[in-house]
Amino acid sequence: MRFISLGYRKVKAVQCYIFLLIWLIIVSIGFYWFLNRSGNEQLAAGLTQSYQDSGENNNGGQVKDISKTGLDDGGALFTVNKQVHPHENVSSTKLHEKAQQNSENIVRRLCNPIHAIKAKEENVQHPDFKLEGVIILLRHGDRGPLTHIGHRNVSHINCEAKSSAFEQLTKFATDTVKFPGYSQFIGPFHSFQKVPLSPFCSLGQLTQIGSAQLLTLGKLIRSIYKPSLVNVTSFNDHDISQPFKVVAYSTRYRRTFQSLFAFLYGLLGPRHLIQSTTIYESQSITFCFKHCSCKAVDRLKKVANKKFSPKNNVKAIMAELVSKLNSVLGTEKSKKTGNSLLDSLLVYPCHNIELPCHHNNHKDTKVQLLFKTIKNLSLYNHYHPPPNPTSSSSCITNSNLENLVELINQENKGLKQVPESRKYHLLNSYGLLKEIVNLALRMTTPPPPPQSSEAWRKHQQTPMFAPDSAFTSFTNSNNRNFVRGGGDGGSKPSRIVIFSGHDTTLQSISAALGILEGSQDIHLPPFGSRLIFEFYRRTQVDSNSPRKLYFRVVFNGVAVTHLVSFCRESENYGTTNSDTNKTAKKFSNLKNKLNNSSSFCPVENLVKYIHDTYFDSFDNATNFKDACKRL
């Protein structure tokens, strides 16, 4: 029995040793996992005094934050954050800056930095044309990515706007409730924050930089159209003798409403914003108004995506690039597409943050993890900062991002040429385009004479345009009361109408108009993009002439009127200034002799397009209802 007892004790001791060894292995593996997750740079920062002031970046490492405060109203309105790895030498930093400069034209263009928001070809000046009104379609400003970027946290990225103008906007936003007429002005958005308050990026939310972009754009539009629009004195902050009405629409997203609020503040100033503006909510991101219900839209989109087949080499390049980016971001399981990857990665170049890296490209066995843990523990007291992680890590480069942008641009352009995609955009934009026609006719129709006069009787009997079955029926019969009365009860129509939407809003309407070229951003609109319809009246023309009303289309400052499908042979007229007005030639002598920025398209063409030929690509359909049913 004694020998049995001693044997039992030995076995018990051996079991205890085995369990203890297993416990030590588990603890060691867990400790190594913790070190690996935190990153060697974080450990180095805790041991090295020179890195105490470093901030955490999205790679899990430590970065120094060298901030330059933005300029005031005349310059940049946001903080420039230059993130530099603490272990990166000066030469590599300069190389990184040079690489960023090389990608300025491709990637940074999508960010639409404030210094790049400039006037170009808007508001053509000509002695025989009078600007009657503008309709402005906006994309919201800079925002955080719509989805998480793997395990990275975007809330650490600084998106702050530092300028006196933005501070004034923020202060005004808090004081608006005190102004009379506030409830009517704010409409259904009374529960929304009017200005982004957090200095950091948030998923899908407008950043302070994005708000500053639209504030700058509002001031720019104000300076462009101030000389030409009626009641220009209302732009003066000290003169309220002639207020005019601005109508604005926004989708029910916080980022589009906040973008609209900043834009209106820049356009009208604090004195006129509340009393001159009415904001309406759009139930759809397409601003479809009464033409929203169409089941065929989703079907067409799916069919178009199935039918679209890019060239084999382009498809292979895209697949390889997407695979690499997903691998670096750790999003292999979610299988992000090229568009979603671009949306996630833009937050880095748009805020001057180094693109992310993945520091562990291979999977170690448990034994290797244990030995690495022991090695790390033994060298803990003699730890030195690792070399530049780009030399030994898999990182996303500026070239990767540039290639991704170019490939997506090619895909978007090719997809729009698929017949089903064309039909999708036509149905998607019909409601908005029809509303634009109605607004244009209201803007360009002069106010009627007093109803008691003889002129009123003649006014009612005179057609707005020359006789034409379809055109006249659309403009005269269906919209006579709406247009002639100037809107609500004979009041003056709005000369400025704004739609605050999304990139898909601009993409759909440009495709519906047949604009597939002309601007490098037409297929991938940057943050804060603008698509403007300008409506003009010819002053020296017979009152009964059908071609007295004209329009222009300008995308981000570039005139694209000549690219509209029904304006390819648009009429060109010379732009003039005060020195050449006296010697301006007649229209007939100037036609087709000038560049595309001077192209004017008759409003008659737009109306005929909506009424006559819009549904030509649909089989046996002449209206929106039939087109939706027969697909």
Image (spheres, rainbow, N blue to C red):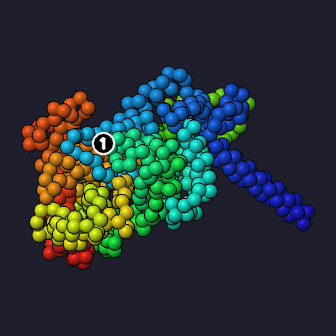
Depicted 297 relative to depicted 116: above or below: below
> Looking at the image, how many numbered discs can be counted on the residues?
1
Dividing the image into 4 quarters, which one contains the N terminus? Answer: bottom right
Give the residue drawn at x 55%, y 23%: 89
Which residue is farthest left? 589
Q: Nearer the viewer, residue 274 or 135?
A: 274
Left or right: where 581 falls relative to 190: left
Give the residue drawn at x 44%, y 38%: 113
The residue under label 1 is 122
Near mark 1 (Cα within 10 A), the count class, few <14, some 14-19 or many ≥20, is: many
Give the residue drawn at x 53%, y 38%: 78
- Residue 617 spot, x, y in % from top left: 16, 66
- Residue 191 spot, x, y in % from top left: 58, 63
Q: Nearer the viewer, residue 351 or 344?
A: 351
Give the residue drawn at x 62%, y 56%: 178
- Residue 219 spot, x, y in % from top left: 44, 42
Q: Which quadrant would residue 3 be assigned to in this image? A: bottom right
Which residue is farthest front? 453
Depicted 117 relative to depicted 338: above or below: above
